[in-house]
């Protein structure tokens, strides 16, 4: 990827030159995340804007009689109207609620106010997201769709705004939360009623407080730094997905979710999300003249089949003008390419290192092929540098290094995980010898030897089991959908779950499948896979039960595991149960004589303090555990 930028000599004296569309390598100043979007805090629209142009609800703060009111402003048959949603004791409590409500209003209203022109016709975007405003239990649906790149991108932001609202109202009394919930339900109901009149000719409400809506770009009082609501952004994303159908479109949507999550979580202020290009661009200090890009696969481009991290350097391009402005061309120096999606946390840490360590890109740019970018797990696979790791110094997970003139590349960075059978996905093999280094000194008083240790070989075999069962779970979802479990011979995995789950729908089963992936990613991040919810407890029990038979002896997987350091505690699955679980209460669900025990209202449940094991609660985080990021994507 090569682009150009024109800049003055002095910091901050930046003037953009011509730009190649496929790249976007200009230097930006990015606002601090999150929130990405900034909203008006006043009830009135901006100066010079006709009040009648407002087609969405705008929330604001209004001090009154020693309290702070949260107002909702919208258009009615009598003109602009402001009503009080609730009151809190101070602005510090009201501001995050108002900010989140404004973002929710924008992300909910804009998709139903603009046309989907992908087919050349005027079509409606989905309205299912309105159901989520009145029912927080349906929020997971926001991250499961595959309608279009633009719509699913907006849904990611809507989910993030709802998450932020949950955090904001957790700091205020319950009546305030109830009032906010009622406001969201009223907003959703109003939009549905207006859409019913517009699309179906339904009779409108006669109420004078009816919230009016019109199908046209609504006024959104924001600074939209990502251009999320620009028509050009929609058109660009529509063009990206022209050749994408079915699974290809779903994979691109999942990759976009990863990029957005990385962008929102990282602290590097120069990071810029290029939505249309499915990439993040970082130019931390123009004086150093190095840049970094993170690219997701883009099937519409022949050369974009893998994830790639690229480091390059700006080179002078042409003479300076009379004002001292010069042109620079991006020159790629090295790349880290991998087929599997990267771990979000690892990408966030990579970008944060750029900001925390001055000159980090310059240091990384000298990494030879086969070496890791210092402080990360990313391996250089292509380089224009003259240095290369000698065969004796190449890691065990690198097959070979090839030279092509002055360019060097790794022919295979990691083996693909062989599948047990004909199906399965290719995955990179983590370095469990480093992730779970274990002590076997046996000395008296050694705390590590005295306690539970998850050894490298145990972790590796458990990781294989989790990934295999995850694939089986996703296979069941794709093949059976909402069908109840009847004949076990027709199912790959969910027939092995307790009978009380047999009639759960595809949404529930997909969450159950993700539990296996969540625990697998814990292992990849050197964390014990300790369950955080009932769904993860069941996943881990099944994985531990399957792990002894998960690897065929004599195969490539067995050889890989055998190369890991041996330990006296290897493959002690009973010790894993004792060390990884808080309790094993969920196993009582397999006993048909205990029907009803899953209900916290059951007398035996109350007496034993078992808790809520009804299927609807399986993915609710335990009170003593940190919740996982609700915006993390599904693999399939």
Image (cartoon, rainbow, N blue to C red):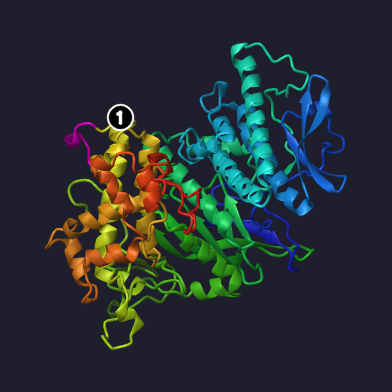
Please tell me whether residue 244 is drawn above or below residue 431 in the rendered image: above
Q: Is residue 426 visible?
A: no
Residue drawn at x 54%, y 64% is: 351
Asked if the magenta segment contains residue 407, the reply would be no
- Which region is colored magenta? 486-492
Q: Position of residue 321 (x, y in %)?
A: 75, 62
Residue 126 left/right relative to 232: left
Q: Is residue 369 above or below residue 107?
A: below
- Does dot 1 land on a helix, a strand or a loop? loop
How many numbered circles does the render carry?
1
Residue at the disc numbered 1: 483
Q: Is residue 430 left or right of residue 385?
A: left
| Image quarter of the C terminus | top left
Instruction: Judge whether 56 appears above or below 273 on screen.
Output: above
Residue closer to the observer: 562 or 314: 562
Res 366 seen here: yes
Residue drawn at point x = 74 percent, y = 48 percent: 94
Where does the image place residue 72, in percent across and percent down from the top left? Answer: 76, 35
């Amino acid at each position: 990827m090569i682009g150009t930028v024109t800049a003055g000599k002095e910091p901050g004296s930046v003037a953009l030159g011509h730009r190649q569309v496929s790249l976007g390598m200009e230097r930006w100043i990015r606002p601090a995340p999150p929130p990405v979007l900034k909203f008006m805090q006043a009830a009135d629209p901006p100066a010079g804007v006709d009040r009648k142009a407002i087609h969405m609800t705008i929330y604001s703060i209004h001090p009154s009689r020693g309290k702070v009111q949260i107002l909702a402003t919208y258009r009615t048959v009598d003109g602009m109207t402001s009503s009080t949603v609730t009151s809190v004791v101070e602005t510090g409590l009201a501001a995050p609620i108002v900010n989140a409500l404004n973002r929710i209003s924008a992300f909910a209203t804009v998709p139903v106010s603009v046309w989907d022109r992908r087919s050349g016709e005027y079509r409606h975007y989905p309205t299912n997201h309105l159901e989520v405003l009145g029912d927080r239990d349906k929020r997971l649906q926001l991250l499961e769709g595959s309608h279009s790149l633009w719509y699913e991108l907006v849904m990611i932001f809507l989910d993030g705004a709802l998450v932020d609202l949950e955090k904001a109202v957790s700091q205020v009394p319950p009546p305030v939360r109830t009032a906010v919930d009622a406001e969201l339900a009223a907003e959703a109901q109003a939009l549905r009623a207006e859409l019913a009149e517009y699309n179906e000719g339904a009779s409108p409400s006669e109420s004078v407080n009816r919230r009016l809506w019109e199908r046209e770009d609504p006024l959104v009082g924001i600074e939209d730094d990502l251009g999320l609501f620009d028509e050009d952004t929609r058109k660009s994303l529509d063009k990206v997905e022209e050749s994408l159908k079915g699974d290809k479109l779903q994979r691109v949507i999942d990759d976009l979710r990863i990029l957005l999550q990385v962008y929102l979580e990282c602290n590097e202020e120069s990071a810029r999300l290029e939505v249309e290009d499915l990439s993040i661009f970082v130019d931390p200090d123009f004086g150093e003249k190095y840049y970094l890009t993170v690219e997701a696969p883009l099937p519409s481009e022949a050369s974009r089949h893998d994830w790639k991290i690229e480091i390059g350097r700006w080179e002078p391009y042409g003479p300076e003008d009379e004002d001292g402005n010069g042109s620079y061309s991006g020159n790629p120096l090295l790349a880290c390419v991998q087929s599997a999606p990267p771990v979000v946390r690892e990408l966030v840490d990579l970008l944060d290192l750029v900001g925390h360590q001055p000159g980090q890109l310059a240091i990384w740019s000298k990494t030879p092929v086969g070496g890791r970018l210092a402080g990360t797990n990313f391996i250089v696979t292509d380089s224009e540098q003259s240095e290369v790791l000698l065969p004796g110094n190449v890691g065990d997970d690198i097959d070979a290094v090839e030279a092509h003139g002055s360019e060097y590349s790794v022919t295979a960075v990691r083996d693909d995980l062989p599948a047990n059978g004909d199906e399965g996905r290719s995955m990179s093999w983590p370095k469990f010898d480093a992730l779970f280094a274990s002590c076997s000194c046996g000395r008296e008083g050694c705390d590590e030897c005295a306690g539970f240790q998850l050894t490298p070989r145990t972790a590796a075999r458990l990781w294989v089991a989790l990934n295999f069962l995850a694939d089986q779970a996703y296979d069941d979802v794709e093949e059976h959908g909402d069908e109840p479990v009847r004949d076990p011979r027709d199912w790959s995995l969910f027939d092995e779950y307790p009978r009380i789950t047999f009639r759960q729908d595809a949404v529930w089963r997909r969450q159950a499948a993700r539990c296996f992936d969540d625990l697998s990613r814990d292992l990849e991040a050197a964390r014990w896979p300790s369950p955080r919810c009932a769904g993860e407890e069941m996943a881990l029990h099944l994985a531990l039960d399957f792990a002894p038979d998960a690897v065929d002896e004599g195969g490539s997987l067995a050889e890989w595991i055998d190369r890991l350091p041996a330990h006296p505690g290897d493959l002690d699955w009973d010790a894993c149960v004792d060390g990884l679980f808080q309790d094993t209460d969920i196993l009582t669900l397999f006993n048909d004589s205990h029907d009803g025990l899953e209900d916290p209202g059951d007398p035996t449940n109350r007496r034993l303090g078992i808790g809520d094991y009804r299927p609807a609660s399986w993915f609710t985080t335990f009170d003593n555990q940190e919740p996982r990021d609700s915006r993390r994507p599904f693999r399939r």
